Image (spheres, rainbow, N blue to C red):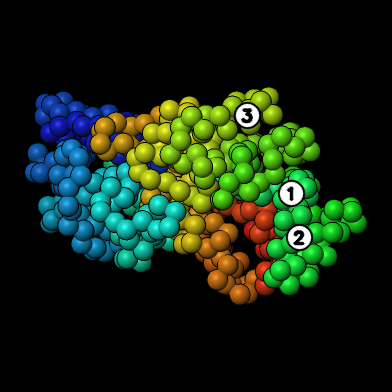
Amino acid sequence: MLLIYTHKITSRFSYVMRHIFTRILGIDVVFTTKVEDFIKHTGPKITYTKQPLQNEFFVRSNDLLFEQGINDLDIRIADWNGTPCFFNAGEKSSIPFDIFSASFYLLSRYEEYLPHVKDEHGRFSPKDSVAYQNKFLKSPVVDIWAYMLLEELKKRFADIDYKKQQYKYTSIIDVTTSHCYAYRGLVRGISGLFLDAVYFKFKRIFQRISVWFNSKKDPYDNFDFLIALHKKYKVHSMFFFQFASYSTYDKNVSTNNNKFKYLIKSIADYSLVSLGASYSSFNDVELLKKEKKALSAVINRPVEYSRMRYNRVVIPDSYRNLVEAEFTDDYTMGYTSEIGFRAGTCTSFYFYDIPLEIQQPIKLHPFAIHDYALLDMNKKEEIELKMDEIRHIVKKVNGTFVTIFSNELLGSSLRVNWKNVYANLLKKSNV
């Protein structure tokens, strides 16, 4: 057991301590504000305040964990043995920065509360993040810091008990368009054919007609391939189906189509199926609940996990809506266009609601790679090298490597063979 002394125990303090010590390092931790209890304790202990009590392991605190609300913070990047860090702690501190405040800043998405310009879908841009601007977006620094802290603690407390987490891989398949041509209804089918003709897309016209007359399989219908691949490599997989009415950004097969429902049920026999929330439900909790209930009725089991369309997350509103809709877990914490770790971690964590100063009951599972972030790469070797780099980083800190691919991209023929890229990823990722 590790004892941490501080002058004030706040919700922020408890939240970040439990993420670093309990979830990442597997260390039992307790807190105290009583000096006499700290002095009497003979096991591993840390002081987290402005001044050390004696010659103990001391981390000089920033004010962040003892404040409320949002303030304009001065972020200056320093270096801790080759790893970027911020919130300098001074010479007396056993480590050179306030690891706990820095971790809270990233995990809480503090910077997303600050004024910023949103993109066309209302999203926070990765280019506005401190991680992107200081070139550490591709590093799960919170986990790296935690293991570096553990090494420092082991120098002082050789008998400290800890239990490292095990590396895991999770493959997420986004199904926002289950079929390119099939099951899409007469009106949508004829309209699509007309547009293909207008823009001289003769290859699509041929494919469309071939699928209609069952002489060719729909290019997006690669679900048998995916299930077989997941079984072969014993991969933990999740399919997020959009189950919503047609709109400008929601163009999946109709929820009334029985063949579409059968597809979802058949996938649910082999893998976890949950909700890819529609674009339209972004600010509509009642619609979100309706989609959740409808999908649950199809698979005959509770739907507890979510992903937001286009990774649209507005802090804190999106997660409050998911909590109200009774989701327990979300897989939207990441960037569509950039590889890396939006919250600085590859370990699942609970959402901290800063305006309410509480930990919300929804667990966030950060993803590292979205397939659309790979589209600018023209060579299969370049794509696989980039994915290998991220996987190795996650393995070093015993984190969870989460990737997101869509059946659309896997069924396309854009420059590279995406099925082959995905198969090679699975082959390596559980090794």
Q: Secondary structure at mark 3?
A: helix
x and y percentages locating residue 20 in the rendered image: 34, 41
Question: What label does residue 294 carry, if any?
Answer: 3
The residue closer to the viewer here, 276 or 146, is 276
Which mark is in front, 2 or 3?
A: 2
N-terminal of the pair, mark 2 or mark 3, is 2
Res. 179 visible in picture: no
Left or right for 263, reference 317? right
Within 10 angstroms of label 3, few (less than 14), some, or many (20 or more) residues?
some
Which mark is in front, 1 or 3?
A: 1
Which amino acid type is marked by label 2?
Leu
Q: Secondary structure at mark 1?
A: helix
x and y percentages locating residue 351 in the rendered image: 37, 37
Res. 1 visible in picture: yes
- Residue at left offset 75%, top offset 67%: 197
Within 10 angstroms of label 2, few (less than 14), some, or many (20 or more) residues?
some
Which amino acid type is marked by label 1?
Val
Question: What label does residue 187 carry, if any?
Answer: 1
Question: What residue would you read off at disc 2?
Answer: 193
- Residue at left offset 89%, top offset 52%: 214
Question: What label does residue 420 carry, if any?
Answer: none
The residue closer to the viewer here, 106 or 147, is 106
Q: Secondary structure at mark 2?
A: helix
N-terminal of the pair, mark 2 or mark 1, is 1
